[in-house]
Image (cartoon, rainbow, N blue to C red):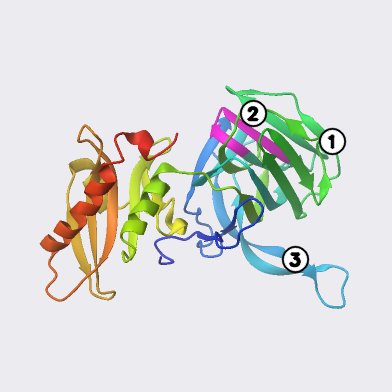
Amino acid sequence: MSRTSYALSLALALATTRLTGAELKLDFSLTPENAAPAGFRSALAGEGQPGEWRVVLADFPSALPSFGSDTASTSRRKVLAQVSTDPTDERFPLLIYEGATFADFTVTTRIKAVAGRVERMAGIAFRYQDPKNFYVVRASSLGGNVRFYKVVDGVRSAPIGNDIPVPADTWQTLKISCRGNHIRAWLNDAEVIPELTDTSFNKGRLAFWTKSDSVSWFGDTVIDYVPQSVPAAALIRAVMKEHPKLPGIKLFAPVGEPRQLKVVASNDPSEVGQLGGVNEQEVMAQGSLLARRDQDKDVMTVLLPLRDRNGDVLAAVRLVMPTFAGQTEENALLRARPIVQGMQKTVRERKDLIEE
């Protein structure tokens, strides 16, 4: 994975088993300054202009105080920022992480309400379905409170939470836990809402959230979660079990609103969310078969369509295959076809790849 092709580094520590199963760290250090991070999608709940999300360089507190000091030291680091300042009251910019869907999880993130005349808020939306259906916990510096809301069919519930000082322009630690239908939240290690029970949404995406003209920063986001069984991911695992010497395999499919061609499963989970290129678009549109040799790595890359039971193209499969002396594009395609044909035996329609 090159730095230029995928700016967002996602450290997926599946080998480090915890009570919930896996840990995901969102690291923006490889994203160019003032660029939007890859693997995310911007959305807007309510009214007004969409959010403007970018990575900025900021003073960020270290985890521990420096030696001989009672205060934590700081360093310059890249963090995520929402920087647009449309003051529309019912405006809620979101930046949705597209790499996974979460059911049971604990998310911890640093938040900082940097500026805002109408509002100074930052929060996390979770079990997100679409801009009209999700949960959110947010902290307000101007209001001096932390609140939980549920949004169902675009209607926001009555707020639940406590009044608590949330200093502006100061890093805070927000933590949210979902276990089944139980929801809890903390600010700086203090529980700030009563434990809630709600059955509206049992799983969904995670998203960074702001309100109105809030300029808000986010960093050190860690998600401890139970991995969901994504059909496309299970398909990739089955292929790798049968063909363990394959250097790589990725599935590209149109997802999101509006539809974008992205990696929905890969033998390298950090690649999920990458955008498809011209070649993948061609495979989707025309059912093309493509092969090329990578001389530097001595492998052959092959692209083929994955079809449903009606013969329509559901996804583009990118296979990286070991090569040998005399290997041609034609016989690379011949070697790849049985692999994709085996995949098609279990894929009859879109829902066999993607749960939406």
Residue 302 in picture, x, y percent from top left: 22, 58
The picture places residue 248, in percent across and down from the top left corner, at 34, 62
| Magenta residues, start to end | 126-138
Q: Is residue 351 visible?
A: yes
**Element marked by disc 1:** strand
Mark 1 and mark 2 lie on one chain; the one further toward the N terminus is 2
* Quadrant of image for the C terminus: top left
Q: Quadrant of residue 186?
A: top right
**Residue at left offset 48%, top offset 44%:** 229
Work out which quarter of the rendered image holds the N terminus and state it: bottom left
Of pointers 1 and 3, the one earlier in the residue sequence: 3
Image position, residue 180 (x, y; %): 66, 36
Check disc 2 and report its element: helix, strand or loop: loop
Mark 2 crowd level (few <14, some 14–19, many ≥20, 10 Å Cα): few
- Residue under the image location 50 percent in, 56 percent down: 35
| Amino acid under disc 1 | Asn
**Proximity of marks 1 and 2: CB atoms separated by less than 8 Å:** no
Instruction: Identify the disc placed on residue 162.
Output: 1
Q: Tell me which residue sits at (32%, 57%) in the image.
A: 242
* Magenta residue check for 281: no
* Discs 2/3, front: 3
| Residue matched to label 2 | 90
Asked whether disc 2 touches disc 3, contact meaning CB atoms under 8 Å apart, the reply is no
Q: CA distance from mark 1 to mark 2?
A: 21 Å
| Residue 84, placed above or below residue 58 | above
Q: Looking at the image, is mark 2 or mark 3 earlier in the sequence?
A: 3
Local crowd at mark 3 within 10 Å, few (<14), some, or many (≥20)?
A: few
| Residue that mark 3 sits on | 63
- The reply, left or right, for residue 184 in relation to residue 3 is right
Disc 2 marks a residue whose amino acid type is Glu
> Badge 1, how many Cα within 10 Å: few under 14, some, many 20+?
some
